[in-house]
Amino acid sequence: MTDLSLQGLSKRFGAFTAVDDISLDIPDGSFVCLLGPSGCGKTTLLRLLAGLETPSAGRLLVAGEDVTDTPAHARGFGMVFQSLALFPHLTVGENVAYPLSIRGRPKAECRARAEELLALVQLDGMGGRRIHQLSGGQRQRVAIARGLAIEPRLFLLDEPLSALDANLREHMQVELRQLQQRLGVTTVVVTHDQKEALTMADIVIVMDQGRVQQVGPPMEVYRDPANAFVAGFIGTSNLLPCDLREGEIAVSGHRIALDPADRVKAAPGAAMLSVRPEDVRIAEDGLPGTVSFIRDLGESVQVLIDHGDREITALYAPGARPEVAVGQKVGFGFAPGGRVVLPA
Amino acid sequence: MSGPTGKPTPGWLAALPAGWLVVFFLVPFAIMLGVSVAHRVPGGFYEPGFELASYARFLTPFFGKILLTSVALSAGAAAICVALAFPFTVILARMGRRAQTLVLVALLAVLSLSEVIIGFSLSTLLSKTAGIGNFFAWLGLIEESRAYAPSFFALMTGLCYLALPYAVLVLYPPVSRLDPELGEAARIMGATPLRAFWTVTVPMLRAPLMGAGILVFVFTLGVYLLPQVLGQPAHWTLSVHITDQAIFQSNLPFAAAMAVLLLLVSLALVGLTLLLGRDRERAA
């Protein structure tokens, strides 16, 4: 069942195209992360979904119903803003119950539902407090509870965790994901933090310059990037220009036979080789390089290798630390199956 | 910028504004208080003394009505100014930077007009021979031109014209600082733009709105020229009568007594407004 359907959605501000002809189908109950660098159009896309911006072209369908011309207040969505946008003149409980009281529900029902929602986000009994009496993490929870008050058809979040410190952010990522799984509400989160996207999402949508670069499950986007932008943006990738031939590639004169598990997405000729740091291997007969830096990251060991004008990053488990020293000339290769050949 | 650090602000610095306050506000007020209880010499000036005759004279229905007129006029002007200035400022804050600057400069230009110019311009504009009556007659809205001044309407127009820029300038900073995401959040949660305005924008700006109202109220309470130029004698405010007593009747003690009473009444009203506002905030 397709719940959310974007059909050629575009948004132009004067000569600037913020969202460029995006078509997507998102299944019911998915947790979707819109991921991209700042200015890539992800927030504009979210505002188009919310009805806060009017699309220049295209349609938006929710469960088959065309909501393109439905004003924001009639869409029945929930949203958490980057600034949280909690109302300081209302108590915590009144904030959470605002979507209900604005719909004219009786006071007793509003209060009961607010208590229920606050319990859901572990803020039991805080309904009488003022917003300014809460910590950052508690405000975050209030905003989430308020967004879920009417059991929205679509739950939208704009960089919801960006104001929290690192520990709390990771905790909230897990909590948000669990909450979404429990309620089964279709959720779209905007983030520029790829770790956050990989942690929470069923589907990651990578955007750049107003266009969708790749759509897929997090591990697929990570292991199998569609182009050099996605490879560079998600995690760390070593990108090397290469020449693609039949069954092999040539990287700075070295011929490397391709494995059937390697992914080739480019046509023969000039291409770009993308390899994750954990798939780089130090080997006698590989490409030449010089070890420039070694550092322990706790859960892994990072080795930087100078290769001409490029720096190659290799990642090892602590137990598999290679016997190399800074300044040593080494050879390096790539694990079969870890090579992705992308269009140049 | 390497001044001596760690040196506390000298205490005598506070003496400067304090001295200013004493010399320019407290001393004149004390003189006025003294004059208000002085003994009036009919046909002459006044001689020092202590009597409450001037205050007693005020306690008549005639002056009571005048006080009521003054308060009602100023309260009306405050209500109208805030009602006009608030939506105006909200729209202003949503305009582009350049447009905002232009409008604000125009508002400040209006402030440079004196009460005299505003009063006489309006009285001309609302007159029978040279005013908008001719225009309405030409349009066919009325049979023949008529005068719209002096009247209550003309006086209220003048007061609002005078005070509106102040109301806008008081409201502008808090309105422009208001996070637009708050209104958007209300809309997503099911509030129409109008309901979002009433349930979020207005309650969040209650303090500045009250501040603007009090400013206009106090400011128009002191206006003494406009009632004479644009109003009928029935609309003459206490300020007009204070001027009249002080300058034309040479009865300074009575003028001073009225001024003291006006001050007390306006202080009491402002205090009451603030008290009511605070109670509502606590109840909310």
Image (cartoon, coloured by chain):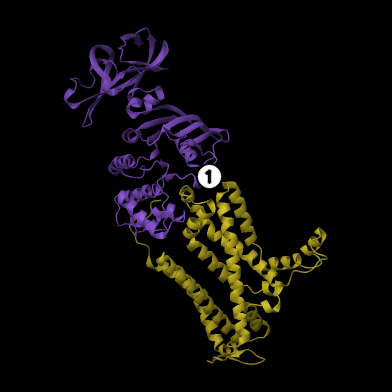
* B114, A201: nearer the viewer: A201
- The x, y position of residue A341, in whole percent, is 37, 16
Confirm whether residue B249 shows in the render. Answer: yes
A253 relative to B227 in the view: left or right: left
Q: In screen coordinates, is A205 left or right of B79? A: left
Give the left or right position of residue A224, taking residue A52 as reference: left
Q: Residue at x 59, y 87 (%)?
A: B58
Disc 1 residue crowd, few under 14, some 14–19, many 20+, Cα 10 Å = some
Residue at numbered disc 1: A71
Residue B255 drawn above or below residue B172: below
| Quadrant of image for the C terminus of chain A | top left
Name the quadrant containing residue A238.
top left
Q: Which chain is yellow?
A: B
Q: Amino acid at mark 1?
A: Pro
Along the line of sight, the residue nearer the viewer: B283 or A279: B283
- Picture coordinates of residue A218 (x, y %)? 34, 29
